[in-house]
Amino acid sequence: MSEKTASEKLKEELFYEPKSAWDRLDEQEIAAADRYCEGYRRFVDDSKTEREAVLTAIELAEAKGFRPFDRTQPLKAGDKVYYKNRGKALLMAVIGTRPITDGVSIAAAHIDSPRLDLKPNPLYEDHDLCYFDTHYYGGIKKYQWPTLPLALHGVIVRRDGTTVKVCVGEDEGDPVFCVTDLLPHLATAQMKKTMAEGIKGEDLNILIGSRPFRDDKGSELVKLNIMKLLHDKYGIVESDFLSAELEAVPAFGARDVGFDRSLIGAYGHDDRVCAYPAVTAILETEHPAYTAVTILADKEEIGSEGNTGMQSAFLKYFIADIAAAFGAEGRHVLSRSVCLSADVNVALDPMFMDVIEVRNCAKLNGGVVLTKYTGAKGKSDTNDASAELMGRIRSLMEDGDVVWQIGELGRVDAGGGGTVAKYIADLDVDTVDLGVPVLSMHAPFEVVAKLDVYMAHKAFAALLQRQ
Ligand code: MN
Ligand code: MN
């Protein structure tokens, strides 16, 4: 090898040249990442909705000794507790050895994903075909949702107060559902519309049947037959839809992508690809110095509203209850806490370079992406993390051998978005976004790189196990 020139040596010393995870990890660690992602694929397949993610996470947590949090019971270092918020959000904690007033470490991901929700009164028949009418949830490109096999997940609360769970379309023998689209032969007018207008929100109706109830005469016999099938299976009548949460999601499971299997394609990487690492990181956390907390939040995709979203007080109350167990005030704990708001960010896509500024965009296989701010326009609507916090997290990543990169949400004024970071920062917690870069974000089939998923686990473990 030829001797480096003076300028090469000086560049090496002074320039910032981010390296791909492929160049930084040895074979052993790459194999560990592949193994880790097997568990991740199972998690996403078992957790297509926020309710299912909560149940899957609790199952994993209980196997590791976590117990339901009881604020009337004393807590001691090493205790592992979880708090389920209305079946749709989850808090997990491992009590640390340091005084609780030193603050806690928080990894906060969300477990809701864009989808088609059934309307409160969804069932109707039109020209002898039966449909569920939907109201889309979260930021979707509507044209992506027709002609996909869809599964239906959720709960129905019957008039008598009992709840029935629904999951149709996931098992090999199950039927699936779909939104139809127009044949190209007759789409001359449709194809002239903008992509935003080609398929409208009210066009997202899910085809659910065509076989009539056998009778000599009568109207709405296809709907009647569907309602009879649903009554036989779930014991419901049509008005029970009024108290239901039914979510249509892509019916396919997670798959390796690429001949080299370096990528994973799945519905709902955003944000299960951060939720799973946030969970696995706390599961392997034993006797941390600072109390470790993992949050799985609902409602992020619609603005973190409602009592299961991060604008709710449930995190504040949970921390207050833990603080009270040690005779402390919740706010004194929060003020000294550190949070990684664990959410995805855009990955550089060579197909769409016009929205990317390459020096500040995350790349697949570049490791986890640390995002100082999200928001839109002149940094509006964002938690803009301080230089001091960025410095602390940098050190934490480097000391934990985490491959990480910096990333913004696209070019200035190209658009924008947000995460739960600003709501947690509102509680006086030092908060910054860190997560996995994603291609095709919010599409029914999103793509991530396995090495980045594994690095997310290592990043959250580095935070939750900090000394
Ligand atoms: Mn997200
Ligand atoms: Mn999102």
Image: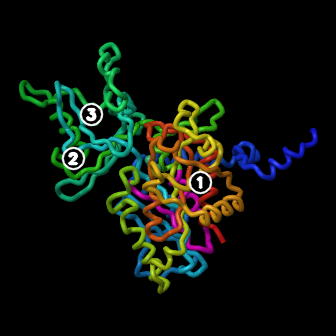
Count of numbered tags: 3
Label 2 crowd bin: few (<14), some (14–19), many (20+), radius 10 Å: some
Q: Secondary structure at mark 1?
A: strand
Residue 172 location in percent, x, y? 42, 34
Q: Quadrant of residue 88?
A: bottom left
Q: At x 21% / y 46%, what residue is drawn?
A: 120
Q: Quadrant of residue 252?
A: top left
**Mark 3 — residue?**
205
Q: At x 59% / y 54%, what residue is drawn?
A: 370
**Looking at the picture, which amino acid does disc 1 mark?**
Leu
- How far apart marks 2 and 3 lie (CA) works out to 13 Å
Is 59 above or below relative to 242? Answer: below
Q: Which residues are magenta?
A: 274-299
Depth check: give the residue in front, 173 or 60: 60
In the displayed structure image, the side of residue 409 where residue 305 appears, left or right: left
- Quarter of the picture containing the N terminus is top right
In the displayed structure image, the side of residue 221 where residue 379 appears, left or right: right
**Mark 1 — residue?**
370
**Looking at the picture, which amino acid does disc 2 mark?**
Pro
Q: Earlier in the sequence, mark 2 or mark 1?
A: 2
Q: Quadrant of residue 110?
A: bottom left
Label 1 crowd bin: few (<14), some (14–19), many (20+), radius 10 Å: many
Residue 120 bears which disc, if any? Answer: 2
Residue 462 location in percent, x, y? 64, 62
